Image (cartoon, rainbow, N blue to C red):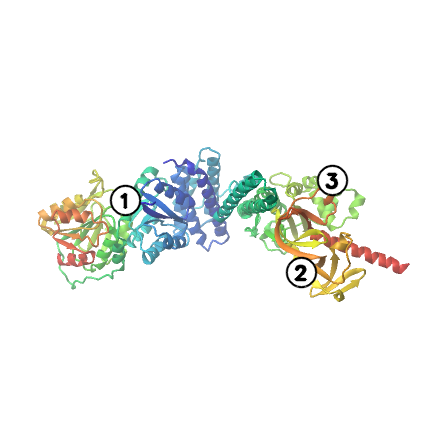
Amino acid sequence: MEDTETVRVLVVDDSFFMRTLVSDMLNSDPDIKVVGAAKDGNNALEKLKTLRPDVITLDYLMPGLSGLRTLKRIMRERPTPVIMLSAYTEEGTAATIECLEAGAVDFVLKPSGTVSVDIEKVKDKLTAKIKRASKVNIQKIKSILARKRVKQFLAPGVVVKEKVFVIGSSTGGPSVLELILSELPSNFPAAILIVQHMPAKFTNSLAERLNRTSEIVVKEAEGGDVVEPGKAYVAPGDFHMTVKRIMTEGATRAIISLNQGPPVHGLRPSVDVTMKSVADVYGENAVGIILTGMGRDGAEGMRAIKRRNGKTIAQDEATSLIYGMPREVIEKGDADYVFPVFEISQGIIQLL
Amino acid sequence: MDVSKYKEMFLSEAKENLQLLNESLLKLEKNPADLKPVDEMFRAAHSLKGMAATMNYSKLAGLCHAIEDVLDKVRKKERKLTSEMVEVFFECFDNLELSLRRISGGENEADVAGSLSKLNGLLSAPGEKLVSEVPEGARLAEEPSSIEKIREIKVKVETLDTLAGLVEELLVNKMLLDQLYASGKFADMPGALDALGRLVSDLQYNVMQARLVPVAQIFHRFPRMVRDLARRERKQVNLVVEGAEIELDRKIVDKLGEPLVHLLRNAVDHGIEVPKERKNLGKPATGTIRLVARREKDYAIIEVEDDGGGIGEEKVKRVAVEKGIIGRKEVAGLGYEETVALLFDSRFSAAERVTEVSGRGVGLDVVKRTVESLGGTVQVATELGKGMKVTLRFPLTLAIISALLTKVGEEVYAVPLTSVVRSVRVKGEDVKRVVGREVVVLSEGNVPLLRLSDFFSFSHEREEGALMVLVNRGNEFLGLGVDELLDKQDIIVKPLDRLVRQSRVFAGFTILGDGKPALILDVNSLFDSVVEEQRYMVDSRARENIS
């Protein structure tokens, strides 16, 4: 008898070797059972109908139907939580970000290239993420994807604000960030700092992708970047991002600095680190926004912003893929506003 | 987690990827304007890299990574594909292959530093040409042994399930027999034994099916080999491969590699002329070698054909005499076929067909020996200036054939279904006599009727009409007169004793469901005997007329 707790997984990979390896990895976990394997996208879509897996692992690079196109059809035909297996390459990271925005719950780096990978760690990550993904309500992703973007509008000639918006997000974040930023108008008059939990390289791909899908400028932050209105800065993977004020050319400017201090809650970049620094520098002009994600990173940062008379927004439970980080903030009473994801951009405009 | 148990799987898939890399690069070299193969190569390199990294083969992974980098630049049109690049890629692929071979033999990976620096060179110096050396490419071609034995066969899950099912039935059958024996119900045993016989033949059939492998398994190496050989000889050669999907018994495919390497090497080294010479002869500068596999009835045919210089009949004769293979007098009387057959003599090969480059005698005799050991035959056709064609014929070793069972007198004869056209019942008035032979007029023409009862000299009542199985050999037709048509059945062919075999009209025998033997007719020999008989008849008629 299969226990109801057992997570049933469909493994999709064009390599027989990889299919076998991944299946063996997963089956070695008593709570996971691989119910099928598919060698390409079309094969996966067929098996999806009969096997009805709880979670799918999907290779991003496959002949025929690509990982992205397969994912999109999965989301359309039978929405199922998908974990992408990605490679640490330029193409791999870009494809992964696109998949995350198209509804993939999460991703795991598979061994590739010269970086030596501890297969045991890959296995631990993969099984943990699969279990987490199995609990996700896929309809939430589906409704975010299906939602028509409602572009916010600001009259021309809007006055530049001193305000800064700092957004922290984790699992399920990329598609939410895409939604929020794409709804902001091109003349958005304030700066945005984004901390998304993600490894190096992926954050660059994320920034590039967000830059393409939104009207404001989005870039991966570099040390020394001047925080300018109308721009969004994504904290690079493996670095903490802080801001400081310095005097240049006779004016005070906020400058981004990066550091590789110890991980906070096991994370680098950490939302708390950035939010606390923003609270210090911007005071009441800071707005903290906490989005979907596992854990409690950001809770202290949001509290720091609130203490300095800044404002705070948390994503609501109904639209959070993983209601972890927002819950911490809301339950501690540090959220001024609790918005469904679709109302966050509007909330940002109102807090300008 | 211990990854070492995945080694065989890794090697098998890595080889597939490597093959894809080689094939795609060849395509790309032929038509550099079409960049589609680059994507395929990219994917294959990427896939191989991932697997190698998982297995902790870091050099292999590193080399794949570097290949991927260069391919990515080509794909994005940041770098142009140059002939140097193609050469470096081929070298890298050889390096990958060497590593795989070493890993397979339990050794360490090959050193990749040289390949890596060449790849880096491609990226760091755009447009700047590397020192182009004459490639030592022919490494693959030099050693036929690099064609690996088939170590694993992919079997369809359904086939395995069928096999498992049959084994299960066998077990049940055995229990039944045990039971019958123990309870002394001997009368019921023949039924169970019949069932056992059927199960065993089913089992044999399915196992044989599972052993079939596509000739692609050996063909896939040849495009690369021919390319390398041609470059070394400074010739332009286009290898056309057809019928790679044809399936043959594993045993034949395994042994086929070496003779084919010989033949292809011959075609490149001696057959195809250098471009300048070809132009002077009014031929296209690029020579064509065709490697074709196809099935013809119960035979698999493999042909190697080139449009090169060929060998003239006169030259063959001259050399044969010079080498003392044949006397001056005998040689004059030889026909074309007998003359070209001299090429298979080992003395001939050693004398005339020594390659200038490798200095090795390339013997057609070796080819002949190997092919004959597999029960096949070799034929050569050549014409001076036009080229050469070597045809290998193998019996399909599948010892099971579909046959039409017929009854003649009390005996059952099996006619292989591959030669059967249809069965016809003819009335007495439709049977004519032409030159002493009964002939039936059908839409196929005048078809000789061979009454098997007559042929096998049974004392048998003479009928006017006939029940006839119409068989063909190409465009020739023959009616086999039988008494009764029994059934269509898959039968196991068993070889006949040497003595019986001499009669030649039987291809073998089989044991029928009821335990009785049935002879299998060799349709080809029956045709021959009718032709011979007619010749004899015509001759004797002619003599009668004269007297």
Q: Nearer the viewer, mark 3 or mark 1?
A: 1
Q: Nearer the viewer, mark 2 or mark 3?
A: 2
Label 2: chain letter = B
Q: Amino acid type of disc 2?
A: Ser
Tell me: B125 left or right of B318. left
Q: Name the residue under label 3.
A: B323
Separation of marks 3 and 1 at Cα, in angstroms: 76 Å
Q: Amino acid type of disc 1?
A: Pro
Please tell me the numbered disc located at residue B69.
none
Circle 1 sits in a helix, a strand or a loop, which is it? loop
**Residue A197 image offset from top left, x and y in percent:** 24, 46
**Residue B240 image offset from top left, x and y in percent:** 56, 52
Q: Mark 1 points at which residue?
A: A199
Q: Which of marks 1 and 2 is in front?
A: 2
**Residue A134 image offset from top left, x and y in percent:** 29, 48
Tell me which label, 2 or 3, sits earlier in the chain: 3
Do the residues indicated by labels 3 and 1 lie within the same chain of the protein?
A: no
| Residue visible at 13% across and 54% down in the picture | A337
Label 1: chain letter = A
Q: Nearer the viewer, residue A67 or B53?
A: A67
| Residue visible at 29% across and 54% down in the picture | A103
Label 3: chain letter = B
